[in-house]
Image (spheres, rainbow, N blue to C red):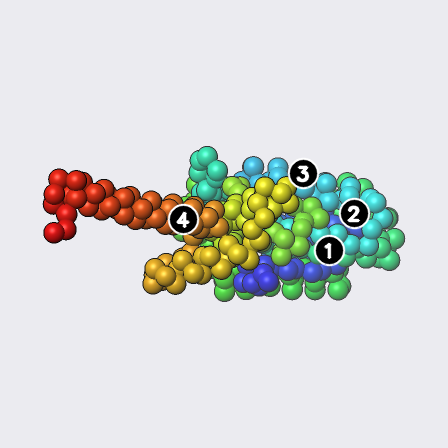
Amino acid sequence: MVEMDTVNHLELSAPPSQVRSVLRAVLCAIFFQRMLDIVEPQTFELLDCHITNAPSSAIERDINAKIDEFVREFVEDGKISGEIAVVFLQKRPKKGWFAITEELIPWEEHLITLHFDRTSSSRSTSTSTSKQQAPTGSHNSDLNKALFQLITFCAEKKGNVPSLADAESLSHQILIAPPSPTDLFSPSPPTYPQRLTSPPPAPITNTTPATATALPSTLSRTSTGTSNVPVSNYTSNQEMMIGDRGSTKRGTSPAAGTTLGYLEQAKDGLRAVGAKAGAGVGWGGRAMGAAFGRGGG
């Protein structure tokens, strides 16, 4: 939501023949209230209204060009009302992807909504086309109220004006059919992509890579007929080996359990061969002792 401290909405009415003079009076008063240059003010009258003007050829050209554009777009097109705004801006640094650039940030807007009273335009047709008739009656009252509202707003909201040290970075724009204040004062999007967030970590499972690769290979051997040992036997062998060792470490894979089983069988075979060899040596020694008279007696 836009703070109303930065937007001054002026609403008034005028006959189509007086649109140029009314707009010029209001626009000149706005620039006089917000001009930071040291100038000698000038005044001009529009019926009972005294308008103070800060003479500037550049601003005068800009005002006249925008009034002509306003008349072509709204008055000559037969519309019942039109909007024009004066937006004061300031250059500020903006962080870009590769460098720091500048952007124009609005700090105050004066929005003028002008309604066209076409019912009273017929009364001014008798005047010369080179002269403009001054607004009278309710139109004069609307102009006085708008000027008084402008002076009050600028006096109360003088904190909106940047410091004189930033005068070189200040500028203005006169907008025909301006955007809404919400769109005008909304922060501009960044010119660089926002930081991407990393995906959430995968859930932790008790299956190790060795176990994950061993189980499918065991099942494939069973399906091809090369091994008839079911998977449940591998699990029981793991539990037995872990229980025999009395260790709390994680169990090994089924392939490792099979290898340890083969080693145990080989050890049992070596023990049996060693026992037989020991018996043969003992018998040979007794026979040789008997032959050399070392035997019994």
**Is 40 displayed left or right of 4 in the figure?**
left
* Mark 2 secondary-structure assignment: helix
Q: Which residue is mark 1?
A: 114
- Asked if residue 253 lies left or right of residue 225, the reply is left
Residue positioned 71% across, 56% down in the render: 113
As drawn, which residue projects farthest toward the top? 98
* Residue at x 30% of width, y 48% of height: 275
Tell me which residue sits at (47%, 43%) in the image. 94
Q: Residue 78, percent across and down?
A: 85, 48
Q: Nearer the viewer, mark 4 or mark 3?
A: 4
Q: Amino acid at mark 3?
A: Ala
Q: Nearer the viewer, mark 4 or mark 1?
A: 4
Q: Farthest residue to the front: give it.
A: 297
Q: Which residue is mark 4?
A: 265
| Three-letter code, disc 1 | Leu
Which residue is identified by label 3? 65
Determine the image quadrant of residue 14: bottom right
Q: Are marks 1 and 2 in contact (CB under 8 Å)?
A: yes
Q: Earlier in the sequence, mark 1 or mark 3?
A: 3
Separation of residues labelled 4 and 3 (CA atoms): 105 Å
SS at badge 4: helix
Q: Pointer 2: residues within 10 angstroms few (<14), some, or many (20+)?
A: some
Sequence-first tag of 4 and 1:
1
Image quadrant occupied by the N terminus: bottom right
